[in-house]
Every structure is written in structure tokens, then in C-alpha cells.
Amino acid sequence: MESLKYKRVLLKISGEALMGEKNFGIDNNRLASYAMQIKEVVDMGLELAIVVGGGNIFRGIQAEEGGMERTQGDYMGMLATMINCMALQAALEKLELHTRLQSAIEMKTIAEPFIRRKAMRHLEKGRIVIFGSGTGNPFFTTDTAASLRAIEIEAQVILKGTKVDGIYSSDPVKNSDAVKYDTINYREVLQKDLKVMDMTAFTLCNENNLPIIVFDMNTPGNLKKVVMGETIGTLVEANA
Ligand code: GTP
């Protein structure tokens, strides 16, 4: 009998990851492959919440570079996350999974408003809860939204699904002697100035002792390995 290491987790998927090999937008094959991986773990009884980024469609910070006010750009980015969330919801429902989409910015026609207690109830009932619109505030990234929501719903861990297979001592593309960490703690990440998440997100996790696992989500089966406790990717754990 296969067993889960965790009962409730929050999965963060970046917008760029949904692009697959494309330069913009959503790659349907990538979306379908993520949905399959998610089904695998939900079918095992995992309670799963998901935060999706929006960088494949719009990035607030780039808007600022183009002369637009940062806040305006950030709100546009939050709307971009909703497009990804709806696409993911559709892909999951195609596999007959039960989902609920909640938005930090009210858009009642297409999503429930974010209500923490309702999200908890959905999770208890085995529904996948997708959180859209980031935190609903400009100047906060979707990594920060992921940390915040994970803490709110009492997730045991944040799983950061990326295209790299973990955290390295330096950029493995530039340095052939870069080493990958299997486990590292918050203090070491700060001391070594490693990039895991932006500082706001990272601090929230650190202060609330929420572990983060960075892993390669593009390899089918990896999500299942992570939730079963296999050592793939890098685990960032509380300071010893
Ligand atoms: P339980 O109360 O646990 O049974 O949860 P439930 O989500 O099944 O109940 P509810 O009656 O709240 O929702 C029924 C359906 O309506 C679900 O698919 C919800 O996602 C959806 N829904 C609920 N509130 C809203 C909303 O404000 N906007 C939108 N667009 N859909 C909503």
C-alpha cells in the first residue's frame, strides 16, 4: 500500500511553467501533464491547494519598465493568474476531479471569493482548491500568495514545482562544480544568499516554520514521489 508523507499541501506552479516550449500563453500538453500528476496524488487522498502564477501572460514588473504604474501592472498580473487558474481547473475537471476556484479579487461570475473557512471545508471534502489573483494586493508575488495561503490553510509544506530539480550552491548552468542540496535550512539559505523565493515569501515561511520543497515538476511522477517523501528536489526546513 502506497502511503503519503503529507495530508495537506500547497502546490505552487509558475505561469512560465505552463508555457511549456511556447513563448507565451498556455501549452495544452504541459497543462494536461500537470493535471495527470495532480490526479495521481489526489486519488491517493492528498488534500491539495494550488496557487498559480501569471508570468506566461503578464508581469507587473515589466509593465513598470514600459512606463506603466507598478500597481496597475500588478493588478493586470493578478488577472493573468485567473486565466491560468481557469485553464487548470478545466484540465482537472476533464479528469473528473472536483475543484473549487477562489479569487482574492472578487469576480463572482467566474470564481468564489477567497474565504479561508470555505477553502478548508473544500479541502476536507477532497476538493482541489485553486487560489487565483495572488494575494489581491500589488507588490506581492504569487510566491508570497502561496506562502500566505499555505499558512492560512495549515498546509504541512509548500511544493514549488519548477523546471529545475532543486536548489544549487551556484548556477549549475554557469558552474560545473555547483552542488545540489537535498536538504538545507532557512538560515543557510540566507547566509549563502540562495534564491528560493522572494524575500517576503521566504520570510513568511521562515517565521511560520513552513517547509518548502523545490522540485522539477516537468518530469511526470515527481509530484507523487515528493508527497510520498522521496528525496527528490531540495527540502528547505526550519532552522535546527
Ligand atoms: P459545500 O457547502 O461544502 O457543499 O460546498 P459547495 O462548494 O458544493 O457549495 P456551494 O453551494 O457554496 O457551491 C456550489 C457551486 O457553486 C460550486 O461549484 C462553487 O464553486 C460555486 N460557487 C459558490 N460560490 C460562488 C461564487 O461566489 N461565485 C461563483 N462563480 N461560483 C460560486
Image (tube, rainbow, N blue to C red):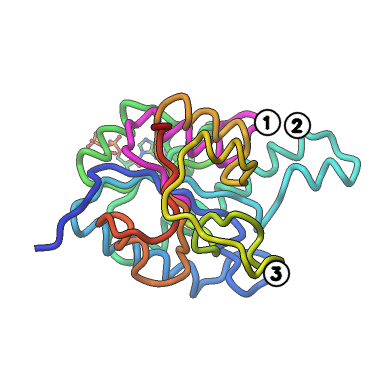
The stretch drawn in magenta includes residue 132:
no
Which structural element holds mark 2? helix
Horizontal relation, residue 159 to residue 193: left or right: left
Measure how far apart labels 3 and 2 are at the Cα level: 25 Å
Residue under pointer 1:
138
Callout 2 environment at 10 Å: few (<14), some (14 to 19), or many (20+)? some
Q: Earlier in the sequence, mark 1 or mark 3?
A: 3
Horizontal relation, residue 34 to residue 8: left or right: right
Q: In the drawing, what numbered circle is on residue 71?
A: 2
Q: Earlier in the sequence, mark 3 or mark 2?
A: 3
Identify the magenta region: 135-160
- Picture quadrant of residue 192: top right
Q: In the drawing, what numbered circle is on residue 197?
A: none
Q: Position of residue 28 (x, y in %)?
A: 51, 72
Amino acid type shown at disc 2? Thr
Q: Which quadrant does the N terminus fall into?
A: bottom left
The residue that appears at 43% across and 71% down in the rendered structure is: 219
The stretch drawn in magenta includes residue 139:
yes
Q: Earlier in the sequence, mark 1 or mark 2?
A: 2
Measure how far apart labels 1 and 2 are at the Cα level: 5 Å
Circles 3 and 2, Cβ within 8 Å, touching? The answer is: no
Q: Nearer the viewer, residue 29 or 83?
A: 29
